[in-house]
Image: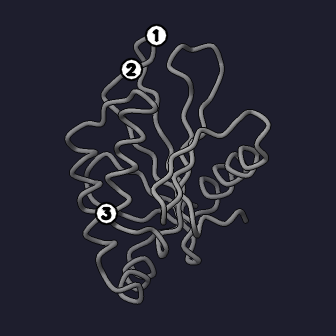
């Protein structure tokens, strides 16, 4: 599977409903944000990861807010956020964020929110923001304790 150890990636459909999609990358150590071009091979890897984790990943309960999290015990994780902003047809267009839960640095969550709101043009709900704050608390835990939480509180999707 594609490695998310040094970067965080986002996927979302374009808000203009012309069938396009946007892929962005956040480098964890530098904070550099980059839009992936159409020819970037990582786009295909991200789509494959969506399929794999959605189909076979464990559901991890973050909290009762607007965060849907699927992961593997190795740490590959996707969260789906439902923003309050809609596309041109009035539908909610979710944003999918990919990272390694054991590698993600808590301070990068604010950069992820910046990327979603400023680069993707979506406004996150208060519930989504509360969920991101809860995730930030989880990321402050020692990694072995976080692993135990994932081990005991994740559920099979089947």
Disc 1 packing (10 Å; few <14; some 14–19; many ≥20)? few
Q: Is residue 139 left or right of residue 53?
A: left
- Vertical order, 75 against 45 (above or below): below
Q: Which residue is mark 2?
A: 86
User: Which quadrant of the structure image shows residue 115?
Assistant: top left
Q: Which residue is mark 3?
A: 135
> Residue 57: x and y, percent?
58, 63
Q: Secondary structure at mark 1?
A: loop
> Residue 29: x and y, percent?
48, 66
Q: Are marks 1 and 3 in contact (CB under 8 Å)?
A: no
Mark toward the start of the polypeptide (3 vs 2): 2
Residue at 27 percent of width and 59 percent of height: 63
Q: Secondary structure at mark 3?
A: helix
- Vertical order, 150 against 7 (above or below): below
Q: Quadrant of the N terminus?
A: bottom right
Q: Are marks 2 and 1 in contact (CB under 8 Å)?
A: yes
> Marks 1 and 3, Cα distance to the nearest angstrom?
31 Å
Outermost residue on the bottom side: it is 144
Q: Which residue is mark 1?
A: 89
Q: Is residue 15 left or right of residue 3?
A: left
Q: Secondary structure at mark 2?
A: loop
> Residue 140: x and y, percent?
29, 76
Residue at 30 percent of width and 36 percent of height: 124
Comparing marks 1 and 3, which lies closer to the viewer? Answer: 3
User: Which quadrant of the structure image shows residue 76?
Assistant: bottom right
Disc 2 packing (10 Å; few <14; some 14–19; many ≥20)? some
């Amino acid at each position: 599977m594609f490695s998310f150890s040094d970067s965080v990636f986002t996927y979302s459909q374009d808000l203009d409903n012309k069938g396009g999609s946007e892929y962005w990358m956040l480098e964890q150590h530098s904070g550099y944000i980059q839009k992936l071009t159409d020819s970037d091979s990582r786009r295909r890897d991200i789509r494959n990861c969506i399929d794999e984790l959605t189909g076979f990943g464990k559901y991890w309960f973050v909290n009762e807010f607007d965060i849907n999290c699927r992961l593997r015990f190795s740490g590959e994780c996707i969260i789906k956020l439902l923003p309050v902003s809609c596309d041109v047809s009035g539908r909610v267009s979710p944003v999918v964020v990919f990272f390694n839960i054991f590698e993600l640095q808590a301070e990068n969550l604010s950069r992820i929110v910046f990327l979603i709101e400023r680069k993707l043009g979506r406004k996150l709900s208060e519930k989504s923001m509360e969920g991101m704050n809860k995730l930030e608390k989880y990321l402050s835990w020692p990694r072995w304790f976080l692993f135990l939480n994932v081990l005991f509180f994740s559920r099979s999707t089947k």
